[in-house]
């Protein structure tokens, strides 16, 4: 749809009556048609998941207390917004629905993935109902829409992927008529459904992804993602004092930053937009007058290193053949295959050719599954001593320097390594793909923060953006 803006509001931007008022104002001030995607109010998804977990363990009192909290948070919000019975009824119906599923889990003593997805989507349903009621109270037509009515996905519960063709058809059917009548759709982020109607979710933080799926399906002009920071920064401001807000980054840079731990966007957000080249803005709903960061398809002039990120919840697994009997390449293939089957995502993979030892970095919460899968798959080699025991090192962190313009910039990697070693930080593993978009460096965990500061300073990232971060 021509002129259409898709706006997504994250959990903090929906976190209270006050924040919802601001969101409503940001939506209704636009002259262009707007389709809205919302997250659950901040911390609500955690609360829902915790409730289901307690239900599985049979903790009835905990379940009741959590549901009371859920009810109170949303009821208070509607009162503060001055909303009437109709909104209260909508909230009560959703809380009751969640209660029904939780009781089912209590009774079963287990959490079927499909019921979990149905239950945790209720956080977004609550926030979208409240916002839609509030916008109507302000005199503008708005309607809450469930993501399950417009986003068609595969059946991977908890981490589903969209099927774009049927999604496009559903959007044309459900959302376009609303937009054409000047009714603002307030769509729940995070959830979808299979083509035969089974509820799914898109993974934690998936509302960004919902918004980009809808922007692509509706041929939006732009996607605006409202969060609680000024835009995409050159580093985590809690680690580095002089971070800058980047005025522009490319899709590829933003995706690399997200995959390497920057909490800016759900990592899969940009994929649906590539084909249509829809620009994305990351903006601060707490400071809407600031420009934010524009995510664009490409730069005419490459811009060197752009940002440095880090991840601390990771572990390094190293493998080494005990002798040359085993083909190192075949061993790698089997290790990768085992990890893929166990659904373990590899963040960094490096090998040295001589002894064919290799290592890979994974998320800490995947360590048990990874070790189990590897030991099972390679049990013969391990028990006969062809392969040395796996080494798991959890005392590591990953630093990543990202920037499209690093490609073909001689000396940049050298400067990064020198800056890190100047701080007496030992580099454990290095990974740089031939796209030269990202340099990944594994260091000791307790050296991670100072390595990030050293790289940020060496690459002069603080001077990058015109709009340095100003205090509110
Ligand atoms: N509410 C969901 C979560 O907390 C999705 C989102 O906020 O993007 O993961
Ligand atoms: Mg979020």
Image: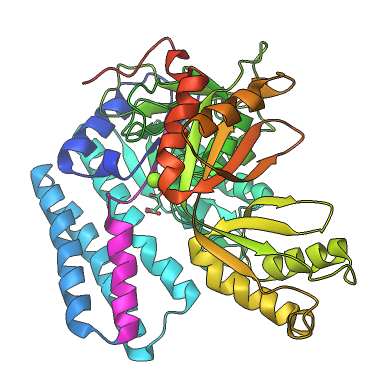
Q: Nearer the viewer, residue 306 or 55?
A: 306
Up/down of 273 relative to 248, above or below: below
Determine the residue positioned at 36% across, 15% down.
468
Q: Is residue 181 visible?
A: no
Figure quadrant of residue 305: top right
Q: Position of residue 273 (x, y in %)?
A: 62, 34
Q: Position of residue 143 (x, y in %)?
A: 35, 44
Q: Nearer the viewer, residue 56 or 94?
A: 56
Up/down of 170 relative to 368, above or below: above
- Left or right: 348, with 240 as reference point: right
Figure quadrant of residue 57: bottom left
Q: Is residue 353 visible?
A: yes
Q: Quadrant of the C terminus?
A: top left
- Left or right: 273, with 117 as reference point: right
Q: How many marks?
A: 0
Q: Position of residue 323 (x, y in %)?
A: 84, 70
User: Residues in magenta?
Assistant: 34-57
**408 inside magenta stretch:** no
Determine the residue positioned at 81% across, 64% down.
333
Q: Quadrant of the N terminus?
A: top right
Q: Nearer the viewer, residue 289 or 433?
A: 433
**40 inside magenta stretch:** yes
Q: Position of residue 303 (x, y in %)?
A: 61, 15
Determine the residue positioned at 38% across, 18% down.
31
């Amino acid at each position: 749809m021509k002129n259409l803006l898709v706006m997504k509001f994250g959990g903090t931007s929906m976190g209270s009556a006050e924040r919802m008022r601001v969101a409503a104002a940001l939506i209704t001030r636009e002259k262009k048609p707007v389709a809205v995607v919302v997250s659950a109010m901040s911390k609500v998804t955690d609360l829902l998941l915790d409730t289901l977990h307690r239900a599985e363990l049979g903790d009835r009192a905990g379940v009741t207390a959590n549901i009371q909290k859920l009810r109170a948070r949303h009821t208070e919000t509607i009162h503060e917004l001055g909303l009437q019975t109709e909104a209260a009824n909508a909230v009560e119906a959703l809380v009751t629905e969640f209660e029904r599923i939780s009781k089912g889990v209590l009774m079963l003593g287990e959490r079927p993935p499909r019921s979990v997805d149905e239950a945790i989507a209720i956080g977004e349903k609550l926030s979208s109902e409240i916002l839609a009621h509030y916008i109507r109270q302000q005199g503008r037509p708005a309607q809450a829409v469930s993501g399950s009515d417009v986003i068609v996905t595969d059946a991977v519960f908890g981490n589903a992927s969209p099927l774009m063709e049927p999604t496009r058809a559903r959007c044309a059917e459900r959302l376009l008529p609303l937009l054409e009548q000047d009714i603002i759709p307030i769509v729940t982020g995070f959830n979808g459904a299979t083509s035969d109607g089974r509820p799914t979710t898109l993974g934690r933080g998936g509302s960004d992804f919902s918004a980009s799926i809808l922007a692509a399906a509706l041929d939006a002009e732009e996607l605006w993602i409202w969060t609680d920071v000024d835009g995409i920064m050159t580093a985590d401001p809690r680690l580095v004092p002089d971070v800058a807000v980047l005025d522009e980054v490319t899709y590829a840079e933003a995706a690399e930053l997200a995959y390497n731990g920057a909490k800016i966007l759900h990592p899969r957000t940009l994929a649906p937009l590539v084909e249509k080249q829809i620009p994305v803005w990351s903006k601060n709903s707490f400071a809407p007058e600031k420009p934010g960061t524009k995510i664009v398809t490409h730069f005419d002039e490459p811009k060197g290193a752009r940002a440095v990120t880090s991840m601390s919840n990771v572990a390094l697994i190293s493998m080494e053949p005990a002798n040359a009997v085993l083909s190192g390449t075949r061993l790698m293939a089997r290790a990768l295959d085992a990890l893929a089957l166990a659904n373990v995502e590899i963040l960094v993979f490096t090998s040295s050719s001589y002894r064919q030892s290799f290592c890979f970095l994974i998320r800490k919460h995947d360590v048990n599954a990874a070790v189990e899968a590897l030991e099972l798959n390679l049990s013969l080699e391990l028990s006969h001593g062809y392969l040395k025991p796996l080494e798991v090192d959890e005392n590591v962190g990953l630093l990543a320097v990202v920037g499209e313009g690093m490609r073909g910039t001689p000396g940049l990697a050298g400067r990064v390594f020198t800056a890190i070693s100047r701080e007496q930080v030992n580099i454990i593993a290095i990974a740089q793909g031939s796209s030269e978009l990202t340099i990944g460096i594994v260091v000791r965990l307790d050296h991670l923060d100072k390595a990030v500061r050293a790289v940020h300073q060496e690459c002069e990232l603080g001077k990058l953006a015109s709009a340095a971060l100003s205090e509110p």
